Image (cartoon, rainbow, N blue to C red):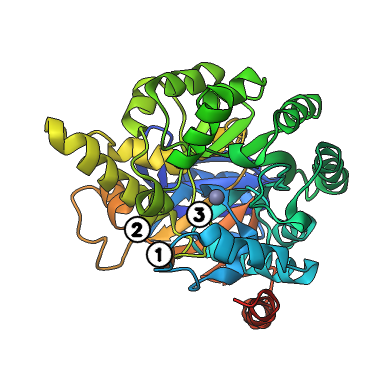
Amino acid sequence: MEATNCELLITDVSVLGPGMVLSPGSAIAINDGRIVQIGPSTSLESAYRTDYHICGAGKLALPGMVDAHTHACQQLLRGRITDEPPMIWVRFLVPFESALEPEDVYWSGMACCSEMIHAGITSFADSGGRHMGEVARAAEQTGLRACIARSTMDAAEFVPANMKDTVQSAIAETEALYRDWHGRANGRIQVWFALRQVMTSTPQLVRAVASDARQYATGVHIHLAEHLREVEHCVVNYRLRPAEWLDSLGLLGPNVLAAHCVVLSDREVQLLVERGTVPVHCPRSNLHSHGFPKTPLLLALGSAIGLGSDGASSAAIDLFEGMRLLKSACQAHYGLPINDATVLPIRDAWRIATLGGARALGLQDDIGTLEAGKKADLILLDVTGPHFAPTHNLVNTMVMAGRPHDVTDVIIDGTVVMRDRVLTRVDEAEIRARATEHMQAVAQRANL
Ligand SMILES: [Zn+2]
């Protein structure tokens, strides 16, 4: 039989299928940005002809991870806020973010995207800062898939004038970003609406964002139920809890990604599930500043859940660590008191970092699992290191011991964006050098 052409063929690899089953000795044929076929290496090697061949011996092929809550604009704050007392928002984030110029954001975005690719992340949802077109440009150039939003705030006295919108300007700025970027890079870039959080939004802004996002058939990114002050603000002003207040204004729906979701009542959990809104936990931030999210209840009610790094300001972007932190936190808080060792099993932890994130981004039909027909967004993980071998169960060990440095190759939209731990489309030394210059310049301007 005549061999078919494909753009990329990965052979001799162990493929993790949607049912968490490993198929060793497999091959993946990729063409036109999508997975064409997954099957035994011996048969695909004779069925396909290719110019780009990767041997996957000693590696796992996994779906790329989804960082469903990032702050690309805060990449240049790394190392500055650790162990600082409150209020981080007033003392650091406001002066820092309001001092950012477009070129700062571009190099911040380039550094953030590079770090994500090295960590095995192939898609991200950014909750938005300033000059977000520059983050879109960084995603386009590095090769990532991204849902970009412009953070909007039109209320609260703790928001400085140059970060505060009117309802009209908030909508107009996102519409302009949408016109410039939505659907660009072969559809890899989407533009979403965003509300920074409940305390910085008027009811008018929430209503306008809800209706415009529906009109544009796009998503809304919001920080929700992050801390008790937010609950108090809502209950005092509106006699409703935060998720109830947003629902009363018509916001909640399957196109809404709600970051954090820690201080939810059980009724609010039920409400999010009914509306199909996807909570995204950020375990590092949540454990430091917020508390324990109601992950087991959400899972029991059938909710999808995503995982977020919440940016790089306090640590590394590392969703392997995020999965394990969430698993340990759930175990400590919910499992131990009832003697249940499986409140967040391996299968669910992995799903949260992949398919759950895909659901949060509205991309579950295209990414999140390795299957023929889906977009070719996948990573290769070297499992020959001493923390992997020998093992009784490689899938368990991948979730419990994997780390960004094990990621050797990253393919997004069928394009190899990292090969043997080196980014193929951008100059990493230049990114580090320019990001360092801009970090110092912003710190000086913001008087940090
Ligand atoms: Zn955040």
Residue found farthest to the left = 339
Q: Visible in this render: residue 418?
A: no
Say whether residue 93 is visible.
yes
**Secondary structure under badge 2?**
loop
Q: Residue furthest top?
A: 274
Point 18% across, 49% down: residue: 392
From the image, tell me which residue sits under label 3.
Answer: 379
Q: Answer with left or right where residue 20 lies relative to residue 218.
A: left
Q: Residue visible at 80% across and 42% down?
A: 170
Task: Please name whichever residue, 360 or 385, is drawn nearer the observer in this view of the structure.
Answer: 360
Left of 279 or right of it: where is 375? Answer: right
Calculate the distance from the C-alpha at mark 3 to the C-alpha at mark 2: 13 Å
Compute the Cα span from label 3 to label 1: 10 Å
Disc nearer the start of the sequence (3/2): 3
> Hey, what amino acid is under mark 2?
Gly
Front residue of 386 and 319: 319
Q: Name the residue under label 2.
A: 402
Q: Which residue is drawn at 38% across and 42% down?
A: 350
Q: What residue type is labelled 3?
A: Ile
Asked where in the image residue 139 lies, by quadrant, the reply is bottom right
Above or below residue 296? Residue 435 is: below
Amino acid on which the number 1 mark rests in the picture: Asp
